[in-house]
């Protein structure tokens, strides 16, 4: 584990964008893998892969979203958050860090979260080649429940992450915690997908 972390830090210094893209894609894929393997009864559409009820294309969609969308937006976003500093007394470093962490977390949860959540469902719908009406329905059904769940999970973690973790490692910290969160997103997206299949049955051949 130590050697893996050392390699990650080295790659982060030499090629940060590619390293973050690969790591983020891997962790989003891991979340979907956990969702499909450990919560099979909660799945919607299932596709046989090597004789198993495992949809490899669904996992690849998670990898694509993580690598090509979230990693680059997340990298820029955390650099923006790192620039937020509130006025404070230089004698009280911990107080200053705490105030900055609260401000950054507030911006993250009140600005990014309401935008990032529908972005996920929109991109996944595009990758699933879903009709426009189906995509709209997915956003309407999932935006508010997912945002409420987000506010129950992320603020406490982000207070620590945004205040005391070096900015170059903040996305990694988010991604590691996100394995459980990505599992939740994958499960919710698949259940929504199953309901939409009832509303929009395949066209008969």
Image: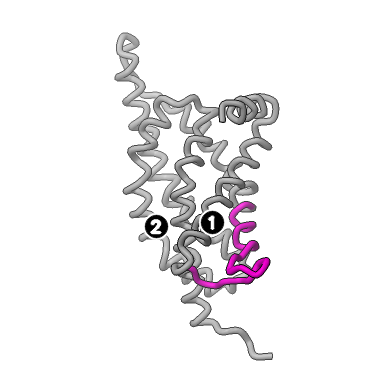
Q: Which segment did they paint magenta?
A: 43-63
In the rendered image of this protein, does residue 93 appear above or below residue 13? above
Question: Which numbered disc covers residue 146?
Answer: 2
Q: Mark 2 falls on what kind of element?
A: helix
Residue shown at the point (69%, 26%) measured from the top left? 14
Q: Is residue 51 left or right of residue 194?
A: right
Most extreme residue toward the front is 51
Most extreme residue toward the bottom is 205
Quadrant where the image shows the C terminus: bottom right
Observer-nearest residue: 56 or 113? 56
The alpha-carbon separation of the residues under discs 2 and 1 comes to 16 Å
Residue shown at the point (60%, 62%) measured from the top left? 58
Observer-nearest residue: 35 or 110? 35
Residue shown at the point (58%, 52%) measured from the top left? 29
Observer-nearest residue: 120 or 63? 63
- For disc 2, the neighbor class at 10 Å (few under 14, some 14 to 19, many from 20) is some
Residue shown at the point (56%, 84%) measured from the top left? 201
In the rendered image of this protein, does residue 175 appear above or below residue 104? below
Q: Provide residue 30's location: percent of width, then percent of height.
A: 55, 50
Q: Is residue 45 located in the magenta-colored stretch of the structure?
A: yes
Q: Is residue 90 located in the magenta-colored stretch of the structure?
A: no
Q: Provide residue 104's location: percent of width, then percent of height.
A: 39, 33
* Residue annotated with mark 1: 32
């Amino acid at each position: 584990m130590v050697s893996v972390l050392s390699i990650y830090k080295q790659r982060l210094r030499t090629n940060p964008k590619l390293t973050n893209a690969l790591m983020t894609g891997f962790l989003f894929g891991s979340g979907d893998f956990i969702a499909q393997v450990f919560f099979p009864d909660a799945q919607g559409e299932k596709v046989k892969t090597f004789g198993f009820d495992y949809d490899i294309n669904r996992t690849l969609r998670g990898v694509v979203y993580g690598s090509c969308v979230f990693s680059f937006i997340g990298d820029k976003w955390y650099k923006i958050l790192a620039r937020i500093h509130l006025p404070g007394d230089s004698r009280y470093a911990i107080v200053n860090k705490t105030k900055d962490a609260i401000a950054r977390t507030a911006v993250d949860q009140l600005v990014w979260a309401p935008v990032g959540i529908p972005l996920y469902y929109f991109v996944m719908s595009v990758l699933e080649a879903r009709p426009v009406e189906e995509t709209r329905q997915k956003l309407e059904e999932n935006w508010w429940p997912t945002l409420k769940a987000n506010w129950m999970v992320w603020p406490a973690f982000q207070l620590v992450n945004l205040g005391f973790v070096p900015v170059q490692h903040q996305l990694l910290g988010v991604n590691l915690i996100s394995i459980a969160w990505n599992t939740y997103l994958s499960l919710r997206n698949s259940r929504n997908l199953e309901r939409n299949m009832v509303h929009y049955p395949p066209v008969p051949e």
